[in-house]
Amino acid sequence: MASRRRKRHETVATLGGAALLLWLLLRGEGAGRGRKPRRDEAASRVRIRISDAGITVDGEPATFDEAVARATAAGAAEVLATGAARYGTVEALTGALRAAGVTVWQLGGARA
């Protein structure tokens, strides 16, 4: 009898834990990872692409300093590093952006 009761308690605890985990994952408010950016937040950031051809900001060619200046003015930047991008360039640019107080989202490729 005690064995059945114990199994029932274990089953209830397991199902309760699974339900809690599912609820936490689906509500998307964990450590900020599941949170979707608000419309105004996504619109205010610049998109920086680093490749072997150079740096582009919102689709326009830019120098290193221009990219940092435009991202600083916006306050946030999405940084996409292609597979052909130099790691040193990606590391230097993301470091300069963070030092300038810019919120940085890295989207792919090499991560600094």
Image (cartoon, helix red, strand yellow):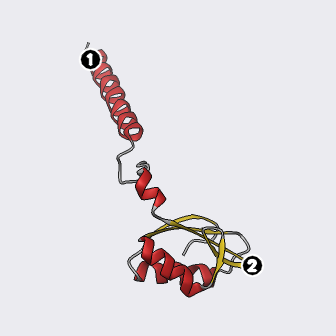
Left or right of 4? Residue 50 is right
Cα distance in 3D space between marks 1 and 2? 67 Å
- Please give the count of numbered marks on the rendered protein: 2
Residue at position x 48%, y 84% in the image: 96
Query: In terms of depth relative to the viewer, which is nearer, 61 or 34?
Result: 61
Q: Which residue is mark 1?
A: 5
Residue 97 circle label: none
Q: Residues within 10 Å of mark 1 (few under 14, many from 20)?
A: few
Q: Which mark is residue 53?
A: 2
Above/below status of 68 relative to 39: below
Does residue 107 lie above or below 5 as drawn?
below
| Amino acid tagged 2 | Ala
Residue 38 shown left or right of residue 63 in the figure: left
Local secondary structure at mark 1: helix
In-front residue for pair 68/5: 68
Sooner in the amino-acid sequence: mark 1 or mark 2 = 1
Element at label 2: loop
Identified by mark 1, the residue type is Arg
Residue 28 picture location, percent across and down: 39, 43
